Image (tube, helix red, strand yellow):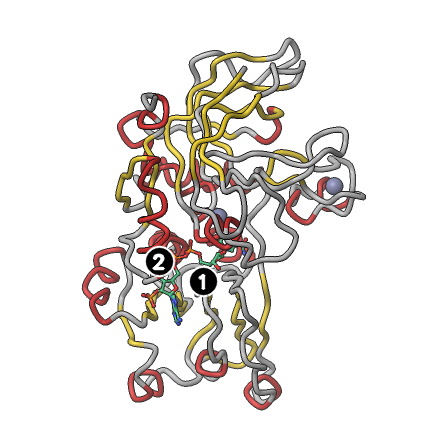
Amino acid sequence: MLAKAFAAQSATTPLGPFSIDRAAPGAKDVAIDILYCGVCHSDLHAARSEWPGMTYPLVPGHEIVGRVRAVGGEVSRFSVGDLVGVGCMVGSCRHCIACDDGLEQYCEGPHGFTQTYGGAVRGGLPNTFGGYSEAITVDEHFVLKVRHGEKDLAAVAPLLCAGITTWSPLRHWKVGPGKKVGIVGIGGLGHMGVKLAHALGAQVVAFTTSPSKHAEALRLGADLAVTSTNPDEMAAHAGSFDFILNTVAASHNLDAFTTLLKRDGTLTLVGVPEHPHPSPSVFPLVFGRRAIAGSLIGGIAETQEMLDFCAEHGITADIEMIAMQDIEAAFGRMVKSDVKYRFVIDMETLRKAA
Ligand code: NAP
Ligand code: ZN
Ligand code: ZN
């Protein structure tokens, strides 16, 4: 089936109309009509080749929600009409240790996991096309059940990346009651990090470079907001955090955060800026056995766990809906940290386009 889409043809051309020949569903595939797709900062990094290895045309989008249009003969978990989600992965080897552990994002097979866009398609040909399109076909293993009500659907889309990318490290580092947790960068990922850490029962401090976000950080669930560029505000928290999750999409000084950790505390990076951070100082790490770690999205089982947790606790993203045609303006605002807190594309605007 030919599906309308929006693609970047090169790192320097704006996204524009494109057409994808989406495969008919194979035996284990689910064909999905995309209703909404979130706009992740990774989409912008990728479209503009701020990361290496991008292939064009590039159709971004890995925060996908939609409705099942058709299923292959061996699909057991989904039926036509179901509301479903697709995140950052559409394939993996399915039998390495990581896949067996339900952590497909760390797949150790020969090709690693298949990214929803810019990944190799079955048979090794480049490249997968993502959710800035009206339809997608995905193996059922990589399709998530959406249990939120239909009216929440647009605000569920960002859970498929921003939600799971913060949930996975929060759970791995055992964030919960009695833990003091920092979330750095109150953007798409960060605002979900605040909501989820709060819902998990932790004491949450939001670190932002935007003083205008203080009041909103509290509304999102933070107990306190700190301006990370104000040394006095930062010093008041020295040595007090169990865990800090850093979602910032730009290079910055990490020492400002490692010094805030308790003994054995961890600063986990999920932001992947174009340019490296200045090398962190070793002193705050060795004096206090503190750690700097990284974390990549999340596995399929934990993504379903996060979606179900959010449905149960009434958690969705705070979104601003846009038309597909306005994506470049949205990217421009994202670069200026001017998003509250996630753009979501209404795919009806693409469907209706001439
Ligand atoms: P976003 O919505 O643009 O949010 C990033 C936030 O970082 C901004 O809102 C801003 O928050 C803060 N920030 C921006 N520039 C800054 C600077 N120069 N110094 C300090 N803070 C700054 O982006 P996002 O979609 O949340 O993505 C964040 C990063 O995570 C991106 O690099 C993205 O590629 C990456 N990512 C990684 C994974 C993974 O699996 N590891 C998954 C998804 C995304 P304040 O205004 O509050 O300061
Ligand atoms: Zn993402
Ligand atoms: Zn694998």
As helix, strand or loop, the secondary structure at mark 1 comes to loop
Q: Check disc 2: other Cα within 10 Å, few if <14, some if 14-19, many if 20+.
A: many
Q: Kindly give the residue lying farthest to the top in the view shown.
A: 73
Whether tag 1 and tag 2 are in contact, CB under 8 A, the answer is yes
The numbered dot on residue 10 is none
Can residue 322 be seen here? yes
Q: Check disc 1: other Cα within 10 Å, few if <14, some if 14-19, many if 20+.
A: many
User: Which residue is at 28% across, 39% downward?
Assistant: 322
Q: Label 2, on which residue?
A: 187
Q: Is 131 rendered above or below residue 210?
A: above
Q: Nearer the viewer, residue 55 or 120?
A: 55
Can residue 198 be seen here? no
Q: In the image, is the residue at mark 1 within 8 Å of ligand 1 by its beta carbon?
A: yes
User: Residue 144: x and y, percent?
Assistant: 51, 30
Q: CA distance from mark 1 to mark 2?
A: 8 Å
Q: Label 1, on which residue?
A: 247
Question: Where does the C terminus fall, quadrant-wise?
Answer: top left
User: Residue 70: x and y, percent?
Assistant: 52, 12
